[in-house]
């Protein structure tokens, strides 16, 4: 046990006893302070933090029982040992019920005092270690829960769920995007938004408004706050009903999901144990971590929207050349994404398929208009030119780092399952799975719309061609899934 950082407060009205005890414990603590009565001790604990208080029970003025009550209110993390005579042993037992860790009967031997102090400090150290482990596991839970969220709404929801399970609040409020002067229905007067949980915030506009204003200050100054009952009573005065005044609250700033600063507040009602500095410290860590997640999510969203703009501008450049296929890429993208969802791919792969569908024919930008828009079957010498479009796409997209995963899907979308396709004549499962999927959507779309060299076929005719080509041109499993999706009406409006 390390004693250098340990701080003990001795409280007794007998100066000689204080002196003997301080001497006896001098090697067990880095700092020993003494007080002559409960009032003086209460004043000391409001100014400083102690690990252990050893207090006489019966003292003139304010006694040990009052002191224990003050400790549980002002410094609930501090342990207390009470000293008592035989006449007040019932009171000592009551003190243990109120939270004292032990009591010693007077007169006691110095060794008994030392053993009781060593035991109390050992147990305290073990408890603090357990708390550190528990705090760490809460942080890890928070980390894994936040890292799998895919949009800011689910990120906020998960963050508040984690705050609820780790801080047992009776109310939580999360203000963001300009947190001042809210009206309580999800958005504030200054464009601020909020999520409110618990009756204090939902049912009492004065409480909500006061905390929203506090959140504005937290978001701007960034200083975490622990609010005790006395301050909260003063803040609300007679303006709100007795039961609506929280007994304690903690609040810290959090980077908002849209880049603007916000704040989270957790409160406890009367009857729940009040929040402590340790709770505030943990909430500060929680919020710092959540801020990083919000920030990174926000940066990804902005990057994704820039990517989407690049994708759309490339596709529009192609479709400006190829008048017969206007809208083709968007429809292939939509069909392929529906098929991907239908067969249970995860959201990342569905997104990938959606982007690849948009970009699959982007290489046609390098195919001469005379070939691209020819209203007839291509001549043998024109086919190789048209068939260069996957390679041209690879050259264009290969320069965009964020589209690396899209590249093989686009490059191989004209491979055939039987190995007779292009550009690499890959066969069966050697063809990237998502390229096989795009190929089915591409084939169906091409058959069911007017092209330069043929009129649109009916859905039934296209189904028959797909079924016939399963295992030859297309992956049979994916054709089967596509036909099932059509049967289920999963395509919606064409
Ligand atoms: Fe193509």
Image (tube, rainbow, N blue to C red):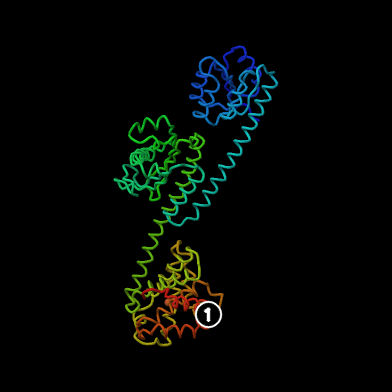
The quadrant in which residue 226 appears is: top left
Up/down of 255 relative to 451, above or below: above
Residue at mark 1: 476
Q: Is residue 381 left or right of residue 67?
A: left
Q: Is residue 236 left or right of residue 402?
A: left
> Residue, x 53% and y 17% (percent of image)?
37
Q: Secondary structure at mark 1?
A: helix
Up/down of 464 relative to 243, above or below: below
The quadrant in which residue 362 appears is: bottom left
Q: Nearer the viewer, residue 245 or 416?
A: 245
Q: Quadrant of ligand 1?
A: bottom left
> Where does residue 471 sit, x and y in percent of width and height?
53, 82
Q: Quadrant location of the C terminus?
A: bottom left
The quadrant in which residue 368 appears is: bottom left
Label 1 packing within 10 angstroms: few (<14), some (14-19), many (20+) = many
> Where does residue 233 sit, x and y in percent of width and height?
39, 31
Q: Nearer the viewer, residue 14 or 5?
A: 14
> Where does residue 161 sit, x and y in percent of width and height?
48, 49
> Residue, x 49% and y 28% (percent of image)?
74
> Residue, x 37% and y 68% (percent of image)?
314
Up/down of 420 relative to 117, above or below: below
> Where does residue 134 sit, x and y in percent of width and height?
58, 42
Q: Quadrant location of the N terminus?
A: top right
């Amino acid at each position: 046990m390390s004693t250098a950082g340990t701080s003990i407060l001795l409280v007794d009205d007998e100066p000689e006893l204080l002196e003997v005890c301080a001497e006896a414990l001098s090697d067990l603590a880095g700092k020993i302070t003494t007080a002559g009565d409960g009032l003086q001790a209460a004043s000391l604990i409001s100014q400083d933090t102690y690990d252990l208080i050893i207090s006489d029970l019966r003292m003139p003025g304010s006694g040990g029982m009052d002191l224990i009550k003050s400790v549980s209110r002002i410094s609930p993390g501090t342990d207390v040992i009470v000293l008592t005579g035989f006449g007040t042993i019932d009171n000592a037992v009551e003190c243990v019920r109120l939270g004292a860790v032990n009591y010693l009967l007077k007169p006691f031997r110095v060794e008994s005092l030392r053993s009781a102090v060593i035991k109390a400090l050992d147990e305290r150290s073990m408890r603090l270690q357990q708390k550190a482990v528990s705090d760490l596991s809460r942080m890890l839970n928070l980390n894994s829960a936040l890292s799998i969220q895919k949009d800011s709404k689910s990120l906020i929801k998960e963050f508040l769920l984690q705050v609820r399970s780790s801080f047992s609040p009776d109310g939580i409020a999360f203000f963001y995007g300009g947190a001042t002067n809210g009206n309580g229905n999800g958005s504030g007067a200054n464009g601020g938004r909020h999520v409110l949980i618990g009756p204090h915030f939902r049912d009492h506009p004065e409480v909500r408004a006061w905390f929203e204003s506090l959140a504005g200050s937290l978001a701007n100054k960034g200083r975490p706050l622990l609010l005790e009952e006395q301050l909260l009573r003063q803040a609300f005065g007679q303006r709100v009903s007795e039961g609506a005044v929280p007994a304690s609250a903690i609040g810290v700033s959090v980077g908002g999901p849209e880049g603007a600063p916000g704040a989270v507040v957790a409160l406890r009602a009367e009857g729940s144990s009040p929040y402590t500095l340790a709770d505030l410290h943990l909430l500060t860590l929680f919020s710092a971590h959540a801020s990083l997640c919000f920030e990174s999510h926000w940066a990804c969203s902005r990057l994704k929207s820039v990517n989407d703009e690049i994708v759309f501008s490339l596709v529009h450049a192609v479709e400006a050349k190829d008048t017969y296929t206007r809208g083709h890429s968007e429809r292939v993208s939509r069909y392929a994404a529906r098929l991907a969802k239908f067969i249970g791919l995860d959201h990342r792969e569905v997104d990938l398929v959606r982007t690849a569908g948009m970009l699959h024919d982007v290489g046609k930008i390098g195919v001469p208009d005379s070939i691209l828009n020819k209203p007839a079957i291509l001549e043998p010498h024109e086919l190789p030119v048209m068939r260069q479009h996957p390679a041209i796409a690879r050259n264009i997209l290969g320069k965009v780092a964020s589209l690396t995963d899209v590249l093989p899907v686009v490059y191989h979308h004209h491979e055939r399952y039987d190995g007779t396709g292009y550009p690499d004549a890959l066969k069966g499962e050697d063809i990237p799975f998502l390229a096989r999927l795009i190929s089915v959507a591409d084939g169906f779309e091409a058959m069911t719309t007017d092209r330069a060299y043929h009129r649109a076929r009916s859905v039934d005719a296209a189904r028959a061609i797909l079924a016939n080509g399963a295992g030859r041109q297309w992956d049979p499993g994916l054709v089967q899934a596509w036909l099932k999706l059509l049967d289920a009406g999963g395509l919606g409006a064409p």
